[in-house]
Image (tube, rainbow, N blue to C red):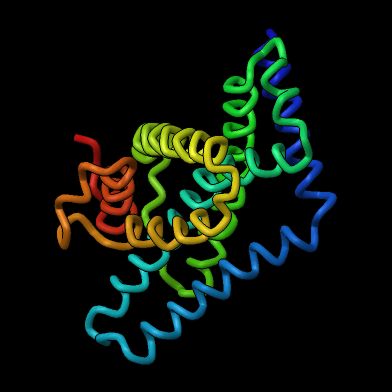
Amino acid sequence: MRWLNLLKANMKKEYIELKRYLPNTIAMLLTFYIIFLGMFAGIQLIGDPSAQDSNIQYAIVNYIFWFLSFMVINSIGYEMINEAMKGTLEQLSMSPMGMWRIMAARLISTTFINLVIVVVLLYLSMATAGQWLNIDVITIAPILLLTVISMFGVGFIIAGISIILKQVQAFLQILQFILMALTFIPLSVSPVLAFLPFVKGIDMIREIMINGAALN
């Protein structure tokens, strides 16, 4: 029951912040959508016409998962920085629920809200490009769950680094480009990436959405 109340409170907190800072939320969504438009235009203008459809499909899936990984992994790092700057980090540590439970609840809440945003961006991107992917929810859901859990693990590592080093904003900015590489580079090009967190899951979901692969 305490876990449920904690999760409910953090979900409400995340929703209120997104609503209260609505211009910032809209700007964030527009930024990622404009990035997709840039990729879409680049593929159409200078891409191989014979492979244009598949390249656009790859771009849609890759940029959607880049957004998701960026928001999930980086968010907890920025949470730790903000709590430290506001002087409330120690209060979280003294909470009966413990800091890690509070941060886990925030991470789950952030992920849930970002998954809703991802669905909106996904369908908006598909409508813009005129390319409709295979959205097999039953097949995608278990792989996505394991992929997100591995993102949580990386997120907690980032949170630990944020507590120790304090000022890691520059590192978090660099991290978004590392995440872009991990989500955009297919395992067929660099198989060694399969040993890194969440990369294999993204590759499997990409196969399902683009090539219609199944779990069996």
Quadrant the N terminus occupies: top right
**Could you tell me if residue 138 is visible in this image?**
no
Q: Residue pushed farthest front?
A: 165
Question: Residue 73: image x %, image y %?
Answer: 50, 44
**Could you tell me if residue 123 is visible in this image?**
yes
Question: Residue 40: image x %, image y %?
Answer: 44, 79
User: What residue is rendered at 71% in x and 23% in y?
Assistant: 92
Quadrant the C terminus occupies: top left
Relative depth, front residue between 207 and 130 = 207
Image position of 34 (left or right of 137): right
Q: Residue pushed farthest right?
A: 20
User: What residue is rendered at 33% in x and 65% in y?
Assistant: 58
Question: Residue 8: image x %, image y %?
Answer: 72, 24
Question: Residue 28: image x %, image y %?
Answer: 65, 63
Identify whether 28 is placed above or below 196.
below
Displayed quadrant of residue 26: bottom right
Relative depth, front residue between 192 and 7 = 192
User: What residue is rendered at 46% in x and 73% in y?
Assistant: 130
User: What residue is rendered at 62% in x and 39% in y?
Assistant: 110
Q: Residue pushed farthest bottom?
A: 45
Identify whether 45 is placed above or below 68.
below
Figure label count = 0
Identify whether 42 is placed above or below 185.
below
Image position of 191 (left or right of 119): left
Image position of 25 (left or right of 49): right
Relative depth, front residue between 208 and 114 = 114
